Image (cartoon, grey):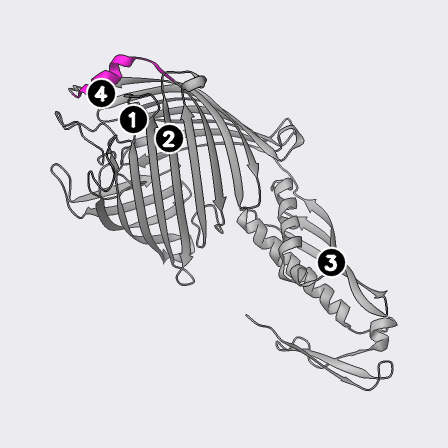
């Protein structure tokens, strides 16, 4: 993108005169002169035009920054004051000062300030100027009630009908702390959790997260009950990059569902209550334009979890995840994206086994579509029951396009690939990769995100369906 401006000057410095024009025609042979520039005569001058360009560029850049944070400003008012001063034998623009007023009802003041700071440094005109740039920002968030209470119903082919209740407070005790109580309850899954977050722990740039939870999940072959908590610290290195370190402690009980003959599952049932204590380090970089339904940008993340050893507990393992995804606008309203995930969990005791609740089971709407939930898994060679893998590989390709643009109702074509492998096996010498393709529709409805997708298994194995339909609506989990 290129923009042009032109000027014509006739005569000497003090007795001459000139005109300035822009390609757009907004300025067309607009007069300027020595007296208009240096003697306060009414009319335009180069410094005034630079100030207008800087103020307008900053306002738009701030709006873009706020959009990335999910904040819509009511108004952004910016005035730039450019100083032309004598430096040595000539003159230079030495400073550009921005006076800013941002009205963003209900927004987080700190986030709005961060957006303004980023726009001040990053708007194209700021980058062009070699002058010192300063700013006074007045932020009007017009803060209203900060507490929320919400509830709803949802449905998924995995969990069937479930209910959700959430109670949240975004400014606990007026300190900017965030706290929430969350519950999800249904026939197959029940979850209760309480979360606390301090975005500026001890007035630093670190954020503190504390959580406690109790869950009960019924799968086709076993039931899992877990109670525990997590404490973690996070740090934002840049607008796009953050890291975290967390400690987890929980107790898990695996119970039988129906008749089970797999020795792997019987061994898990016999262990009773299993305690896990672990440390996890994570690193994440996210340059997407939107948190929900992005159209451009990428995400790269990785994490390593160490359990047992000096931390204690019954579980002894190391687990790591590597994930990358990217989004590319194909046209103004269509997006192509890819996602790649590799995960591996290794027992740290010689001859040890990874607990079944830390293993990988694939299939379903959030991994490899075209397969039923948890269908892709190593099987017990004697009984054929799924026992989970200690490695997983997932790849997804998607093309999303609008169906009804006014309500963000979209269609999707997808191609998925992946599998899970047992301990001691690898993708190149064990079970082959599995493939599926399909199509579906998506809608971010007032009740929550809706997904309706049909997946076709390209090479069905014994007991596998050729086509699997998945439907979810309600709060994502």
CB under 8 Å between discs 2 and 1:
no
Vertical position of residue 161 compared to residue 251: above or below: below
Vertical position of residue 95 compared to residue 393: above or below: below
Q: Secondary structure at mark 1?
A: loop
**Was residue 271 drawn as part of the magenta stretch in this picture?**
yes
Q: CA distance from mark 4 to mark 2?
A: 21 Å
Name the residue beneath numbered marker 1: 188
N-term mark: 4 or 2? 4
Q: CA distance from mark 3 to mark 1?
A: 58 Å
Residue 255 horizontal/vertical position (percent): 26, 17
Name the residue beneath numbered marker 4: 265
Q: Residue at x 72, y 61 (%)?
A: 130
State left or right for residue 128 relative to residue 345: right
Name the residue beneath numbered marker 3: 79
Name the residue beneath numbered marker 2: 319
Query: Camera-side residue: 245 or 404?
Result: 245
Q: CA distance from mark 4 to mark 3?
A: 69 Å
Q: Secondary structure at mark 2?
A: strand
The N terminus: image quadrant: bottom right
CB under 8 Å between discs 3 and 1:
no
CB under 8 Å between discs 3 and 2:
no
The C terminus: image quadrant: top left
State left or right for residue 67 relative to residue 348: right
- Give, as a single range, the part of the protein colored magenta: 262-275
């Amino acid at each position: 993108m290129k923009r042009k401006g032109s000027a014509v000057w006739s005569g000497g410095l003090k007795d001459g005169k000139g005109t300035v024009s822009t390609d757009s025609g907004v300025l067309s042979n607009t007069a300027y002169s020595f007296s208009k520039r240096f003697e306060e005569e009414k009319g335009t001058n180069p410094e005034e035009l630079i100030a207008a360009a800087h103020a307008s560029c900053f306002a738009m850049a701030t709006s873009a920054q706020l959009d990335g944070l999910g904040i819509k400003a009511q108004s952004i008012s910016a005035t730039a004051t450019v100083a032309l001063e004598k430096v040595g034998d000539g003159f230079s623009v030495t400073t550009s000062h921005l006076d800013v007023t941002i009205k963003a009802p209900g927004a987080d003041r700190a986030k709005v300030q961060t957006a303004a700071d980023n726009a001040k440094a990053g708007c194209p005109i700021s980058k062009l100027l070699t002058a010192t740039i300063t700013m006074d920002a007045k932020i009007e968030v017009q803060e209203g009630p900060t507490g929320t209470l919400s509830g709803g119903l949802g449905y998924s082919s995995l969990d069937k009908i479930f209910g959700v209740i959430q109670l949240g407070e975004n400014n606990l005790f007026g300190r900017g702390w965030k706290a929430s109580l969350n519950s999800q309850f249904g026939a197959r899954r029940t979850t209760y959790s309480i979360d606390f977050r301090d975005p500026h722990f001890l007035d630093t740039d670190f954020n503190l997260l504390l959580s406690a939870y109790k869950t009960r999940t019924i799968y086709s072959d076993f039931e899992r009950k877990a109670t525990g908590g997590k404490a973690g610290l996070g740090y934002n290195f840049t607008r796009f990059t953050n890291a975290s370190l967390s400690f987890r402690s929980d107790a898990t009980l695996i119970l039988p569902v129906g008749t089970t003959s797999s020795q792997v599952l019987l061994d898990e049932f016999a262990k009773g209550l299993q305690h896990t204590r672990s440390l996890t380090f994570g690193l994440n970089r996210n340059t997407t334009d939107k948190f929900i339904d992005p159209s451009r940008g990428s995400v790269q993340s990785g994490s390593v979890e160490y359990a047992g050893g000096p931390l204690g507990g019954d579980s002894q393992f190391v687990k790591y995840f590597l994930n990358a995804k990217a989004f590319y606008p194909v046209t103004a309203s269509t997006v192509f994206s890819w996602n790649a995930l590799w995960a591996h969990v290794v027992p740290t005791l010689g001859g040890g086994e990874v607990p079944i609740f830390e293993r990988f089971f694939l299939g379903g709407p959030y991994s490899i579509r075209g397969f039923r939930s948890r269908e892709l898994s190593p099987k017990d060679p004697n009984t054929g029951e799924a026992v989970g893998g200690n490695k997983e590989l997932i790849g997804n390709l998607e093309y999303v396009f609008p169906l009804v643009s006014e309500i963000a109702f979209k269609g999707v074509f997808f191609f998925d690939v992946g599998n899970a492998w047992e301990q001691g096996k690898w993708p190149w010498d064990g079970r082959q990769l599995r493939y599926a393709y399909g199509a579906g529709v998506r809608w971010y409805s007032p009740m929550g995100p809706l997904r309706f997708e049909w997946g076709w298994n390209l090479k069905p194995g014994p007991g596998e369906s050729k086509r699997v339909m998945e439907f979810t609506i309600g709060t994502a989990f």
